[in-house]
Image (cartoon, rainbow, N blue to C red):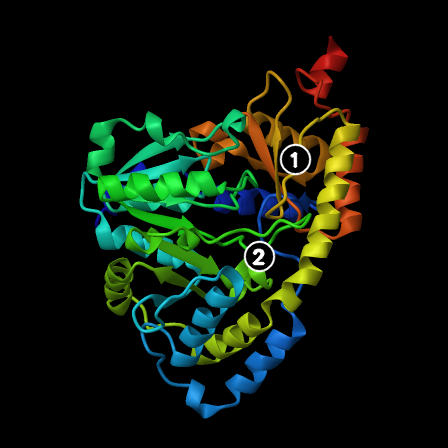
Amino acid sequence: MPKPSAHLAKLPPYLFAEVDKKIDAARAAGVDIISLAIGDPDLPTPSFVVDSLCAAVKDPETHNYAPYHGTKPFRDAVTSWMKTRFGVSVDPEKEVLALIGSKEGLAHMILAYINPGDVVLCPSPGYPVYNNYTLLCGGEPYTMPMEAADGFLPDLKAIPPDIARRAKLMFLNYPNNPTGAIATEGFIKECVEFCRNNDILLCHDNAYSEMTFDGYRAPSFLGVPGAAEVCVEFFSLSKMYNMTGWRVGFAVGNAAGLKALGTVKNNTDSGVFKAIQRAAAAALGRSDELTAGLNKIYGHRRDIAVEGLRALGWDFKPNVATFYLWVPVPPGMKSTEFSAMLLEKCAVIVAPGLGYGPAGEGYFRIALTVPEERLREALKRLETAGIRWTMTQAPEKRAAG
């Protein structure tokens, strides 16, 4: 057998694949696992969207190949949603592109632009695809650390001028996975100006734009004047409407960037199933109605988790977006050590912060993707096992001492 590409050897183990292995092994051993690690909604896709799909599937007109850039009704629905939701105007012919989920689009954008040795500016902590697909393309990821003291916004002034000159893409994601942080208008303007001055394409992953609480509404980066000159924004219906398995999303913004991305897609895939695009267009037409109920549920779960963790000694401000909590590990512990201990002592799985890049060390991520009773059970297990913010070593070691 031939050897795989040398680029594969550069990749760290994919975080969620490793989490899945641990879950499968524990469940095979008969352990009652509560997984708070993966951002896959436990709630079903709204019935209205499912009904729309069923009707579309029965129409033979949906059974053939879809246009590579998306059907016209889907692109028109995206255009209308962007205008209604953000006040942003996009051209459905040149500035909208259907995606097989935003993950695919993010990865293919790197393939469209990066030659071996080119630099990609990647946030840390951040969604692993930005860093890992850069490595697969032979590019050079440059880590932009995000610290709690800065609101988990990278310091663009800290990027060395030579790195900025070599960079072709910058990836950002607000509301943020994994931290739940949000971007200020001033920061967005700074990013647009930085990318304009350095001839960088700004790739904004806006997958969590509709998952917000406490009256907050996430902006589109394209709402900043001049952003369309340097920015492509990626949206996913996965988290908007609990449609992770449907694999549908879209990219909007800079026409040249979308043309390059579309060229990769034309030579790689055959587009999103027309019936799914029809159902997705229907969902976008009733977006606020569909997300309001979901956000109420996720917001309630957030409050339960924050209250439970505070009772165990953690003190942190709850975020106003995403269904994640980004929580510091107890002092003196590593994130992988802490997550392993929770699995062993509590049969609870959380995502270690290190899996999101070097700046993720010292944290773990909770996904609020289990029913309320299971979330309360997970917190009860932590309390019973003596796991608290103030612990400095594993419970059995403290007992032995």
Q: Position of residue 44 (x, y in %)?
A: 66, 65
Viewed as shown, does residue 251 lie left or right of 369? left
**Labels 2 & 1 near each other (Cβ < 8 A):** no
Q: Position of residue 202 (x, y in %)?
A: 33, 47
| CA–CA distance in space, label 2 to label 1 | 31 Å
- Residue 374 is labelled as none
Q: Position of residue 159 (x, y in %)?
A: 31, 28
Viewed as shown, does residue 6 lie left or right of 284? left
Total numbered labels: 2
User: Which residue: 72% across, 34% down?
Assistant: 346
Three-letter code, disc 1: Leu
User: Which residue: 44% across, 38% down?
Assistant: 187
Pointer 1 residue: 343
Three-letter code, disc 2: Glu
User: Which residue: 67% across, 33% down?
Assistant: 317
Image quarter of residue 367: top right
Image quarter of residue 101: bottom left
Task: List the single residue furthest toward the top.
Answer: 401
The secondary structure type at the circle numbered 2 is loop
Using the rendered image of the protein, determine whether residue 361 is visible from the camera's viewpoint: no
Pair 2/1: label in front? 2
- Residue 210 is labelled as 2
Please rate how many residues cluster around mark 2, counting C-alpha atoms within 10 Å: few if below 14, some from 14 to 19, many from 20. Answer: many
Q: Position of residue 180 (x, y in %)?
A: 57, 41
